[in-house]
Image (spheres, rainbow, N blue to C red):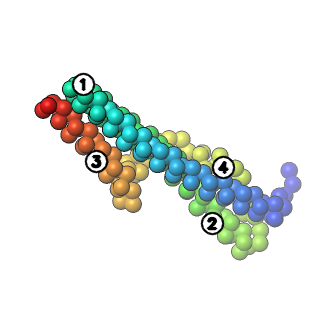
């Protein structure tokens, strides 16, 4: 294979970067939808628990909250991978602009952002990072509400 024209490579990098930015926005939308479903479904389950006077139904709501929290963690990890690739690509684009040449380590494709597979080892860093404490607080608050609601069903 011959050398890639630097202009063509630069255009590919910009296209790649644009797709990554769109993917980040889509992950944000998906994570927002997950939070909505977590609140809606746990509220519905809590209402059923009160209506049926069965606290075991409320425990099901706790499991639902845990499921949605885990689902958001998966999406968050994918989004972080895309952001890392986007940052890497941004550096390559800046270098290509400065050197007027295509960096040899550039490989086209959004698939580069998903080269890593899901890892449970990354989960604590994703959950307990201070910049994302709102996510942890959201799900802990929702879990607490479900547990208190379930306890309330016991008292009724």
Residue under the point 34% across and 50% down: 138
Q: CA distance from mark 4 to mark 3?
A: 35 Å
Crowding near the residue tagged with mark 1, few <14, some 14–19, many ≥20 C-alpha atoms within 10 Å: few
Residue ID for mark 1: 52
Q: In the structure shown, which secondary structural element does the residue marked by tag 2 occupy?
A: helix
Q: In the structure shown, which secondary structural element does the residue marked by tag 3 occupy?
A: helix
Labels 1 & 2 near each other (Cβ < 8 A): no
Q: CA distance from mark 4 to mark 2?
A: 16 Å
**Position of 48 compared to 112: left or right?**
left
Residue 38 in view of the camera: yes
Front position among marks 1 and 2 = 1
**Position of 85 compared to 6: left or right?**
left
Residue under the point 29% across and 33% down: 47
Q: CA distance from mark 2 to mark 3?
A: 39 Å
Q: CA distance from mark 1 to mark 2?
A: 58 Å
Q: Earlier in the sequence, mark 4 or mark 1?
A: 1
Classify residue 44 by image quadrant.
top left
In the picture, the disc for residue 91 is 2
Residue under the point 60% across and 45% down: 115
């Amino acid at each position: 294979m011959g050398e890639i024209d630097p202009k063509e490579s630069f255009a590919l990098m910009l296209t790649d970067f644009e797709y990554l930015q769109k993917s980040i926005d889509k992950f944000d939308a998906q994570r927002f939808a997950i939070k909505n479903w977590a609140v809606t479904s746990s509220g519905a389950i809590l209402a059923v628990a009160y209506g049926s006077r069965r606290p075991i139904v409320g425990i099901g709501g706790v499991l639902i909250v845990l499921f949605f929290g885990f689902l958001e963690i998966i999406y968050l990890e994918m989004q972080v991978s895309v952001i890392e690739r986007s940052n890497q690509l941004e550096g390559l684009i800046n270098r290509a602009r400065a050197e007027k040449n295509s960096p040899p380590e550039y490989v086209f494709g959004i698939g580069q952002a998903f080269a890593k597979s899901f890892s449970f080892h990354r989960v604590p860093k994703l959950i307990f990072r201070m910049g994302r404490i709102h996510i942890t607080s959201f799900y802990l608050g929702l879990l607490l509400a479900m547990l208190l609601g379930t306890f309330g069903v016991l008292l009724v």
